[in-house]
Amino acid sequence: MSSGSIPRLVIAAPSSGAGKTTVATGLMAAFAEAGLTVSPHKVGPDYIDPGYHSLATGRPGRNLDAYLCGPDRIAPLFLHGAAGADLALVEGVMGLFDGASGMGELSSTAHVAKLLRAPVVLVVDASSQSRSVAALVHGFASWDPEVRLAGVILNKVGSDRHEELLREAMDSSGVPVLGALRRDGRAGTPSRHLGLVPVAERRSEAVESVAGLAARIRAGCDLDALLALARTVPELPDAAWDPAAHLAPAEGAAAAPEKPLIAVAGGAAFTFSYAEHAELLAAAGAEVAPFDPLRDEQLPPGTQGLVIGGGFPEMYAPDLSANAPLRAAVAELAASGAPVSAECAGLLYLSRSLDGKPMCGVLPAEARMTERLTLGYREAVALRDNALAAAGTRVRGHEFHRTALEPGAGADPAWGLTHPERRVEGFVTGGVHASYLHVHWAAEPSLAGRLVASAARSAAARSAAARGGGR
């Protein structure tokens, strides 16, 4: 089987709340338990669902976002993530045809399905309908002839009689029913203000939840028919994305006697990261070392650069604050001029305080939780040269938080936002680049290259200064 012919399905729904994540994660786990190597993917920028996908399959959950990365990169990124898999399953986002606001189909599940030439299985919440389900499915199947809606899974079915009525109605739709799942309040996963609770915060319970989902899927879905459908896909003509091909070893890193070590924050407080970021750092010549700010009192030995992604630091503010040795180590690294890239949760961690709890004190700002959700895609430009981006670098990103920072930007902001509103945001100070904006580095590999090169130069400068001080 060539890489372009990997069997694949897109799991979509008419709207949010129909059960996409339940069904997609359960299918991933059920097929993995059956001995298949399953590659998990998620449409859109969401970081949380891929954690459950990874738990279900044992492979990194990967995002496919045509807004952040551009339509031309979707198939190559898919092929990169799915290499060596027997089956790839792609969980959609929102409703099937819902895309980036005001931009038509861009970044919708339907858009990604077309880019992947993949059949779509629609998960329908059947809890309050019977014959109407056929009209709903007919509408979705006929809306865009380029989208191949090839099957339906009926979710939240109330009884055997209810299922009978639904199947009778669907017989005339021309779209086969590939599964019917009963209502089961026990099968869900807990959520809070930004979606599901991440796997890292409830791993043992998440393992049980995923196993339960797999059992429900085996009982209610025709796995043989779903796999046969996945195998009907045409060949994708694209080449797999390769971080090494997109990013040669960074200037400064290649000449360094050792690979610069980039520490990457993880653990329960910092769960938001795209898998391609670590791959790009390694391709740029770095050694990547994960650490957990909730547990580790020091940065990994030899750290020459730091990446702190997103997550839920507000849930762990007391514990993060209590780890004073690590906060001091982060502040010391930042003061040395080493590059530090911080997004959203990382931005809060670098502030003076979060909800009154002392943080690292790298940035002259105070952070707090609010009732207001800030959510949406953004376009931005780097206003000055910094450790992450050259002046003029244009990126697409997204914001996703219920916190506020005062002030919201430093004397040298990290980004100038250009769409959908114009404002400055974030902080650039020394080697620190800190912002609310989440960016997918696969769309702009120079970010990883510049960070690694900055780490190599900073390490060389500190080493030279140390040798000079010893004479």
Image (tube, helix red, strand yellow):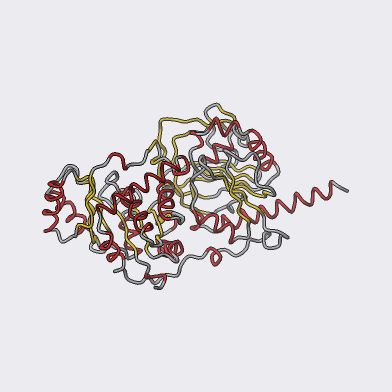
Q: Quadrant of the N terminus?
A: bottom left
What is the number of callouts on the image? 0
The residue positioned 56% from the left and 48% from the top of the image is: 383
Q: Whole-percent x and y of residue 362?
A: 63, 37
Q: Residue 439, position in %: x, y?
A: 49, 50
Compared to residue 3, the image places residue 195 above or below, namely: above
Residue 451: in sight, yes or no? yes
Position of 98 with respect to 129 (left or right) is: right
Outermost residue toward the right in this view: 471
**Image point (50%, 30%), residue name:** 368
Q: Is residue 273 above or below residue 405?
A: below
**Residue 102 at least partly seen:** no
Picture quadrant where residue 366 is located: top right
Q: Is residue 403 above or below residue 43?
A: above
Measuring from the top left, give residue 93's x and y in whole percent.
34, 50
Residue 305 x, y percent position in the rendering: 64, 49
Q: 145 or 174: which is nearer to us? A: 174
Residue furthest out toward the top: 356
